[in-house]
Image (tube, rainbow, N blue to C red):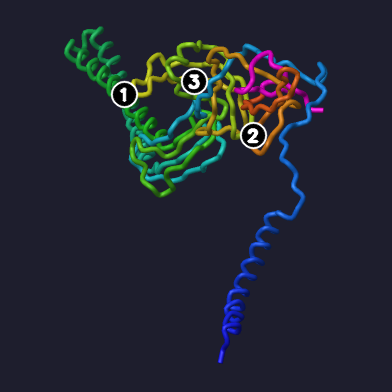
Amino acid sequence: MNTPTTQNNNVAKKWLIPLLAISLLLIMVAWLAGSFNDKVTPDFKESTPTLTSESSFTVIASDEVIFEGVAASITAKLATVISSRLLARIDKINVRAGDDVKKGDVLITLEQKDLSSKVIQANEQVNAMQIRLTESKQNYLRAKELYRKKIASQFDMDKSNADYQSNIAELTAAKQSLGQAKTTLSYATLRAPIDGKVVDRFAEPGNTAQAGGKLLSLYNPLSLRVEAQVREQLAVTLMQGQSITVDLPTIKQSVSGLVEEIVPAANTGSRSFSIKISVPYQENLLPGMYARLLIPAGQATKLYVPLSSVSQVGQLDFVNVVIDGESQRRFVRVGKNSRKGYANIISGLAAGEQVLLAE
């Protein structure tokens, strides 16, 4: 039989184990939180360096021309599309995309059998008319002599003269027909109208060339230029012959171009003008490439500090500004450098302020 003392011992044992487990858990949490380590009071105060004129720099303010970037494209001033004037089967194409050609090179040959036959027929017709003309001329001269001797009548002389003049007209018409046949035959041979490079080929031998249908496209690499749509407020400040900086990101170069043409009418939808800029020849440039015009858009005051005075924390830039003889950290925005060894400060500083240089 359990006594009261025994029952109390059982209750104590029942609660003792959970209490010990909870106590141990609390001790572990406190240990992980560093409760048993020596604590150091946080101190964000930076040591103030000895400030001298050699260790600080006065922010420079400079009035400079600012430029506005305008997206543009490379185009060819001399470009052409080769098409046929005839409805004929393509016999041969001598070039492909990327080939270089010279002016006058044979590019495409069309079927010429029927056209050559017409030239031969027209040539024979001219020969026949020349023979008839020679005969009619002799008859006219003979009739004229007989009329002078009172042997032939006026009617005979007039008739022979009419036959002679008629043969002259027919010979002229035959020669024109021969010239037309030769011209039509020449249309069967398509030649390069300019020195340049083949951009694309739109047909193959055996296809039927339609009159006016494009077969090849060419451009002259020496005639490449830059074209852009410039907003009207900026376009009206440009003049023909003005020098413009052209950035070519694809080939990682910047060149100086000249304003060649300003279309004297604005695009009513975008309120912009078409500007065409001539650029020096670049071997790696191709039509359709991206370019960027840097057009002067006024003046602005820019602030500069030495690069050594700018530090980084992650992606943030900061400088140490001298205020009342003490250094204070200040975050700034840095723009594109236009001076070697200096940083362009967009915001965060004012002209005349002092910044510390890195030791």
In front: mark 3 or mark 1? Answer: 3
Question: Which callout, 3 or 1, points at the residue further toward the start of the chain?
Answer: 1
Q: Mark 3 points at which residue?
A: 276
Give residue 180's position: percent from left, percent from top: 35, 29
Is 353 part of what is drawn in magenta? Answer: yes
Residue at mark 3 to residue at mark 1: CA–CA distance: 54 Å
Give residue 58's position: percent from left, percent from top: 73, 15
Mark 2 residue element: strand
Q: Mark 2 points at which residue?
A: 316
Q: Residue at x 82, y 28 (%)?
A: 359
Residue span colored magenta: 338-359
Q: Residue at x 47, y 19 (%)?
A: 275
Q: Residue at x 71, y 54 (%)?
A: 34
Dividing the picture into quarters, in which one does residue 10 lie?
A: bottom right
Q: Do the residues labelled 3 and 2 touch (CB within 8 Å)?
A: no
Q: How crowded is mark 3: few (under 14 residues within 10 Å), some or many (20 or more)?
A: many
Q: Which amino acid does label 2 sit on?
A: Leu
